[in-house]
């Protein structure tokens, strides 16, 4: 069974730009969660989607948004990038919110 | 709001020794997770603990859960260098998974 895939793996952007990251969950998994990982703040929950609906959102500004498609693939978008948005963005999929999560390799975003 | 605290945050130990990482959480958590992360890599699921008294073991790692004390432990037996990594515990409440800050484990040969 293929694992969680994330594209792109690396991104370099400049302040003020926007970025879209993509996540393809394990086949059959309907829950997709996004996390931001930084050395200072650690792993922080961004949001979770289940069956195309956002079920939960962490404490991030509205510049961070996401969506999920009918095939469970998910995208997250960050608009008006700031230097502090530089991080590893991890996507995780699971059968439901309560099941074990499987993480993708992450997208490393650098904002210059 | 669920808060998850791990200690220690950094641990350097000799091969062959035993040690325990502690994970305290502030309020009821539906379940407790342990993950491993190698430098520059993603997270790998180690254990999912579902109920009070749950104990799971995989190789030299053993995780347990005490829901009354709101405490989970990850015990390392006879550590080997390959276990060097960062270990995260996480709790689940209201459909949100909240991670601890991680314990960076460095095992010296």
Image: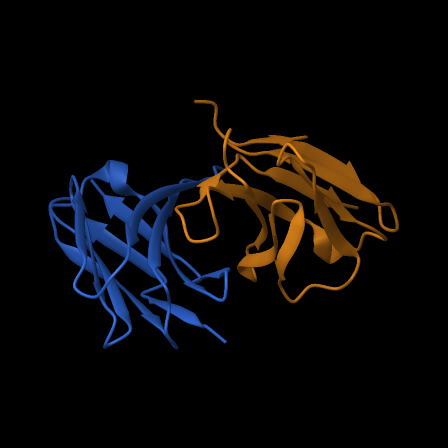
Q: From the viewer's perspective, is A12 left or right of B101?
A: right
Q: Residue A84 sits in which quadrant?
A: bottom right
Residue extending furthest toward the top:
A1
Q: Where's the C terminus of chain B, which quadrant?
A: top left
Q: How many marks?
A: 0
State how the image is colored: by chain
Query: Residue placed at 15% from the left, 43% from the top?
Result: B60
Q: Residue at the spot x=37%, y=64% of the render?
A: B30
Residue B106 place in picture, x, y as percent: 30, 48
Horizontal relation, residue A36 to residue B43: left or right: right
Tell me: A76 left or right of B28. Answer: right
Question: Of A51 and A109, which appears nearest the observer?
Answer: A51
In percent of width and height, residue B11 lies at: 29, 57
> Which residue appears at 23% of the width and 62% of the height?
B73
> What residue is shown at x 52% (from left), y 43% (from top)?
A92
Splitting the image into 4 quarters, where does residue A23 fall?
top right
The quarter of the picture where residue A8 lies is top right
The blue-tinted chain is B
- Rendered hue of chain A is orange
In the rendered image, residue B43, in percent from the top left (x then y), is placed at 44, 42
Q: Position of residue A51 (x, y in %)?
A: 61, 45
Q: Is residue B30 above or below residue A37?
A: below
Of residues A89 and A46, which is closer to you in this image?
Answer: A46
Seen in the picture, residue A78 relative to A103 is either above or below; the reply is: below
């Amino acid at each position: 069974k293929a694992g969680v895939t994330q594209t792109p793996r690396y991104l370099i952007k400049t302040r003020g730009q926007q970025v879209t990251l993509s996540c393809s969950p394990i086949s059959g998994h309907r829950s997709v969660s996004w996390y931001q990982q930084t050395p200072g703040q650690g792993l922080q929950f961004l949001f979770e989607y289940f069956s195309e609906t956002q079920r939960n959102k962490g404490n991030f500004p509205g510049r961070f948004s996401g969506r999920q498609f009918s095939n469970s693939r998910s995208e997250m978008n960050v608009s008006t990038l700031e230097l502090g948005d530089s991080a590893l963005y991890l996507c995780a999929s699971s059968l439901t919110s309560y099941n074990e999560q499987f993480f993708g390799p992450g997208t490393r975003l650098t904002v210059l | 709001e669920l808060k998850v605290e791990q200690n220690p945050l950094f641990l350097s130990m000799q091969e062959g020794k035993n040690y325990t990482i502690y994970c305290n959480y502030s309020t009821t958590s539906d379940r407790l997770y342990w993950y491993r992360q190698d430098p520059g890599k993603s997270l790998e699921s180690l254990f999912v603990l579902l109920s009070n008294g749950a104990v799971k073991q995989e190789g030299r790692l053993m995780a347990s859960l005490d829901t009354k004390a709101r405490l989970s432990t990850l015990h390392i037996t006879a550590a080997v260098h390959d276990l060097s990594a960062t270990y995260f515990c996480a709790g689940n409440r209201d459909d949100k998974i909240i991670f601890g800050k991680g314990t960076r484990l460095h095992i010296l040969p």
